[in-house]
Amino acid sequence: MWSLPILKLTQMTLSSRLYTFASPKLPKHCALPQISPSFPLKYPPILTRSLPFASHFRRASLSFSTRSTAMGDAVDAGMDAVQRRLMFEDECILVDENDRIVGHDTKYNCHLMEKIESENLLHRAFSVFLFNSKFELLLQQRSATKVTFPLVWTNTCCSHPLYRESELIDENALGVRNAAQRKLLDELGIPAEDAPVDQFTPLGRMLYKAPSDGKWGEHELDYLLFIVRDVNVNPNPDEVADVKYVSRNDLKELLRKADAGEEGLKLSPWFRLVVDNFLFKWWDHVEKGTLLEAADMKTIHKLT
């Protein structure tokens, strides 16, 4: 009978993480439970110097603190604390250009242009387009502390499914829809009951690459999710600087200002790709209640 090694427990809140073992003698997957301040630790944090199965972890939980110290402290001392934690704690799903899962890596590595270019790192992502009952689209302005594309205006919510069991489910894009529900709460304070998973309609997928600055960028296989709901919005200032609903004409005016460089207004590259290629024709289906007629999840639109 094998036994798990003792792992370091920290006082911070950790999301349930999924780890993969390489040893055939161990179970393929092991999930660590959530640890939060509401669940007090019975024993003080313990760090063992040598873990019996450490060599079998493809992503060891202890490597988080090592990477954070070695890379984050030395290289990114000016990074916002919340964004920095997410950069090392979150594990994105790596895919090939056909959306087949090939591994996982930190959000930090997945957004380094050096890694994107040298290793062709491509990760799975999603973009939510939420409309209210007046068929107005909810936009957000990304916070000033975001590592990539700070203070740009974009669609309702843009993020990544994580390498965890609930967000790895490919059937009917359920993993991506689970992730979208999670991030609507994290970023915009929209409770799960306001955005049921079965109300997201996946309309398509696109692949794109976009540098943010000299260091950071995006290389994503992006699932485009539409939902029509009246929701309560309570933005998280660590993620969102501002929000607003726009009509078609409002959005066209935003596009004009962005193109003219007025008011310093900028749009995210993935949002602009969706606007230029799909959004207005899909908006017709939103108003007609025929979104399913527009869905095409077989094609991956390569818009790089």
Image (tube, rainbow, N blue to C red):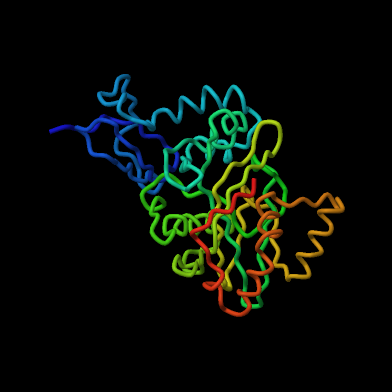
Residue drawn at (38%, 42%), measured in percent from left and top? 17
Which percent across, then down, holds residue 209?
A: 63, 42
Quadrant in which residue 217 is drawn: top right
Out of 102 and 238, give the one closest to the viewer: 102
Image: 172 above or below 101 = below
Which percent across, then down, holds residue 300?
A: 54, 53
Image: 127 above or below 97 = below
Image: 14 above or below 273 = above
Out of 142 and 6, give the one closest to the viewer: 142
Image: 256 above or below 287 = above
Counting every numbered tag in the picture gives 0
The furthest residue to the left = 1
Which percent across, then down, holds residue 140?
A: 67, 57
Out of 10 and 239, give the one closest to the viewer: 239
In the rendered structure, the answer to whether residue 46 lies left or right of residue 289 reads left
In the rendered structure, the answer to whether residue 30 lies left or right of residue 92 reads left
Quadrant in which residue 227 is drawn: bottom right
The furthest residue to the bottom = 288
Q: Quadrant of the C terminus?
A: top right
Which percent across, then down, holds residue 195?
A: 50, 67
Q: Quadrant of the N terminus?
A: top left
Residue drawn at (51%, 28%), measured in percent from left and top? 68
